[in-house]
Amino acid sequence: MAALYKQRCMKCNKNYVAATSRDRYIQCYDCQKDDLNKPIKDPVMKKMFDLPEEYYKTNSFLRSIKSNYLRFGKLTDKQIEAFKKAIEKIKAESV
């Protein structure tokens, strides 16, 4: 696992975000919030992305997958599987 460190958001340059050396363009939740709140028409995807806001605030991977879906209109099977695994991991940590 890569080491975590805090870096300022590259868009607003105010908020700090947990990042790794693999992250390229680091954005805070506040900067991505407008992009993530676009309507989703597909009922299956709408149900999958219907998560508590706290999950998206704390996990940039979940935000990345949702923004990719909103941008391209579809996800690969591996992306969907990884998204579901990340949700399970978050739920297990919160219990």
Image (cartoon, rainbow, N blue to C red):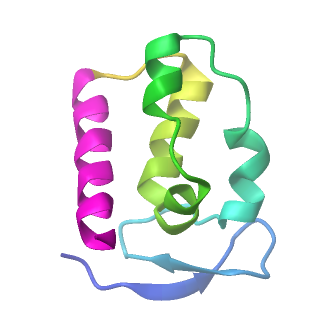
Q: How many marks?
A: 0
Q: Which residue is located at x 32 percent, y 62 percent?
A: 90
Residue ID at (29%, 85%): 3
Rendered residue at 76%/59% (across/down): 31
Q: Main secondary structure of the magenta part?
A: helix
Residue ranking furthest to the top? 42
* Quadrant location of the N terminus in the rendered image: bottom left
Task: Examine the rendered structure and indicate whether residue 85 appears above or below residue 38.
Answer: below
Along the line of sight, which residue is nearer the eye, 83 or 90?
90
Task: Locate residue 12, reporting x and y percent.
Answer: 81, 71
Above-or-below relation of 46 to 1: above
Q: Residue furthest left?
A: 1
User: Percent position (x, y) of residue 74?
Assistant: 45, 17
Vertical placement of residue 43 versus 22, above or below: above
Q: Quadrant of the C terminus?
A: bottom left
39 vs 75, nearest the viewer: 39
- Camera-nearest residue between 64 and 24: 64
User: Residue 39's image quarter?
Assistant: top right
Residue 50: give x, y in percent of width and height. 53, 36
* Residue that protrudes farthest toward the front in the picture: 95
Tell me: 37 left or right of 80.
Answer: right
Q: Is residue 11 left or right of residue 56?
A: right
Q: Is-magenta flag for residue 1?
A: no
Instruction: Locate residue 41: give its quadrant.
Output: top right
Q: Nearer the viewer, residue 91 or 9?
A: 91
Magenta region, residue range: 77-95
Determine if the magenta segment contains residue 88.
Answer: yes
53 above or below 50?
below
Q: Residue at x 49, y 62 (%)?
A: 24
> In this rendering, would 28 be left or right of 13?
left
